[in-house]
Image: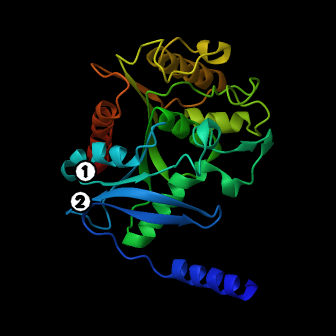
Amino acid sequence: MRRALSCLALLCLLLFSLPALALETGAGSYEYLDVPSGRTLTVFYYKPASFTDQTPVVVSLHGMSRNARGSRNDWQKHADSLGIAVLAPHFTKEQFAGTEEYNLGNILRDGKKNPEALWSFRLPDAVFADFVKREKSKVKGFYLFGHSAGGQFVHRMLLFQPKTKAKLVMAANSGWYTMPDLAEKWPYGLKGMGLTNADLKRFVSFPLVILLGEKDNDPTHYQLARGPEVDKQGDNRFARGQYYYSCGQDLAKKLKAPFKWRVIPVPGVAHQNGGMVDAAAKVVAEDLAKNKKK
């Protein structure tokens, strides 16, 4: 039995060591094995017909509904016109249980830090790196978008992944935020998480775009977290996003650091991934146009 298991493990290792085949054009999905954590994620993708080794990439993170396919689909209608590839990894409830393992990045377990190999925050970069290798792409970085729980994920990820290849991050309709405050206890702040003022300077100097649906202002929304720590940020998602942006602005002044965040209110949109993707696509289009002029 032991020999059979060893042979099976060796076979799996050999299979996953083989070069991955390039993806077919259009919409589809594939399995990505993250070797350090041993987890396999289904990645829903869209590859435009115009794809080349210079095609920009968007990594899109779903909300607590865990609807990665829908996240991909909402970007798909923009992919051809913008000339972008879309990757939407699926963080299943079975492998990434609850807020702790998804929204909060699986950094802690029972109050102690997990090995970094187990952090969920590693995975957007890992999925991107695998895609670049698979497609023989020459792009050096990617756009990162997250809605709702995904928005929570991406703004926290920036704090703990200083070497991320994300070049612009868009956090949409986050339910609440981890404040860039070294004196406030995790997960509402960063006390005891090993970060410094140098990390905060880097954070406020990163191009983070906070997208806020103007109609996402219901204080009784069934998915909205409530409690004294988060209610200090506001009584609805729209107010909390504005508060977070303001705190970042104040922190940048205090640290004498460049402030590169933006806050963009999105008229007519409530807690809807599709409407926020439409707004995020405009941000990507603007950035692509700006880089084209350089």
Quarter of image, res 176: top right
Observer-nearest of 80 and 34:
34
Where is residue 116? Give x, y as percent: 70, 54
Quarter of image, res 173: top left
Observer-nearest of 56 and 149:
149
Where is residue 186? Give x, y as percent: 72, 30
Q: Eyeballing the image, is 88 above or below 228?
A: below
Where is residue 72? Give x, y as percent: 33, 48
Report the Cα–Cα distance between label 1 and label 2: 7 Å
Observer-nearest of 145 and 269:
269
Q: Eyeballing the image, is 13 above or below 183?
A: below
Residue name at image x 59 percent, y 25 percent: 252
Reading the image, the residue beneath label 1 is 79
- What secondary structure is found at the residue carrying circle 2? loop
Question: Pointers 1 and 2 in contact (CB under 8 A)?
Answer: yes
Under mark 1, the amino acid is Ala
- Residue 48 is labelled as 2
Residue name at image x 60 percent, y 49 percent: 120
